[in-house]
Amino acid sequence: MSTAPVIAAVDGSDDSRRVLEWAVDAARRRAAPLRVVHVRQYAAWGQADVLVAGPPDAEGDPVLDDVRALLRDVADAPVAEYVAVEGVPGAVLPELGADAQLLVLGSRGRGGFAGLLLGSNSLAAARDADCPVVVVPRPGREIPEGAPAGPGPRVVVGLHADSPDAAGLEFAFTEAAPRRARVQVIAAYPWPAQTWSAPGQTVPPPVGQDAVEHETRSLVEGFLAPHRERHPGVATEVRVLPGDAAGHLVTASGDADLVVVGRHRRRLLAPARMMGSVTQAVLLHAACPIAVVPPAPPKE
């Protein structure tokens, strides 16, 4: 049985060079082949959302030729396949994840507007791809200063104590192990809590902040137990913090190797794939690469 590839989406920009570096490293760590894909927006409008397996020829694609030249100088480069397809990137990129274990792309491509922090193509892929998507941001994103993270590599993962994401946690541990990194779990709880007694009126919460924090930490420790058992060599650090989850994750991204966030499950009344506000905020503002992990398929 063949190993699913790590896909690097490139377009010849500086962003895509960073994507290529990240994808090469990921393929090495996973002992997986690398598939380098260039999506060209040259198809007729009537065929814009169709993946074309034939022309354009990958052998004559200047973007892919540049990548070949770059990888020739990379020691221990993974086995690479080069693919050129035509279509609208926002439609094509999510489809690439159907037979991949990881899709890596930049926060903006050549067509991105200078003022945008995240391109629509990256957003579409992170929302719709079947596999985890890693978005590599441009350097220089400014983030708030937070508490010192401590030395050593880190993989940061957000955990919602009320609806834990097992797929995101497992991805974080799997990424941390070969990096010899610790998993830093960020669990935020809403505070100050408000209880509504009448329109426009609030009363103090029935429990104190210490109790809410203790309960949140207890839940998080329980969720982490099976992952720690499967990955005994991975150190963990739990931070239970009040307030905005997205803000805490962005702050923690400053010198992290990776931030891992989940994607919403489909709901009965909202069958389309969705991304939560926390995931979108992290994609927009985190300083390090961001992995968006789809939920595990429901058990039959």
Image: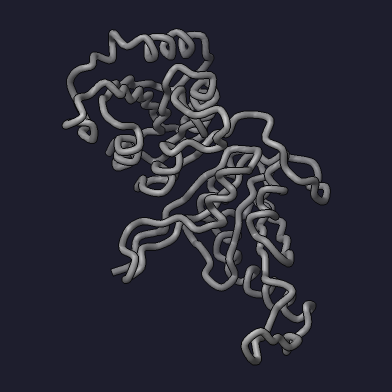
Q: In this view, does 258 lie above or below 205?
A: above
Q: Which residue is drawn at 63% across and 91% down?
A: 198
Q: In this view, does 148 lie to the left or right of 162?
A: right
Report the residue at 48% width, 11% height from top: 70
Q: In this view, does 56 lie to the left or right of 108?
A: left
Q: In which quarter of the image is residue 125?
A: top left
Q: In which quarter of the image is the C terminus?
A: bottom left
Q: Between 109 and 239, which is closer to the camera in this rendering?
A: 109
Residue at 66% across, 52% down: 249
Q: In this view, does 208 lie above or below 156?
A: below
Q: Quadrant of the N terminus?
A: top left
Asked if residue 28 shows in the view, the reply is no
Q: Position of residue 44 (x, y in %)?
A: 19, 25
- Residue 257 vs residue 39, the one in the foreground: 39
Query: Residue 296 placed where, x, y %?
Result: 39, 59
Colouring scheme applied when the structure was drawn: one colour
Residue 295 found in image quarter: bottom left
User: Camera-side residue: 141 or 231?
Assistant: 141
Q: x, y (%) of residue 210?
A: 79, 78
Residue extending farthest bottom: 197
- Residue 130, position as x, y percentages in the image: 35, 48
Note whether 185 is above or below 223 in the view shown: above
Identity of the residue drawn at 43% across and 14% down? 67
Residue 114 visible? The answer is yes
Q: How many marks?
A: 0
Image: 260 above or below 219:
above
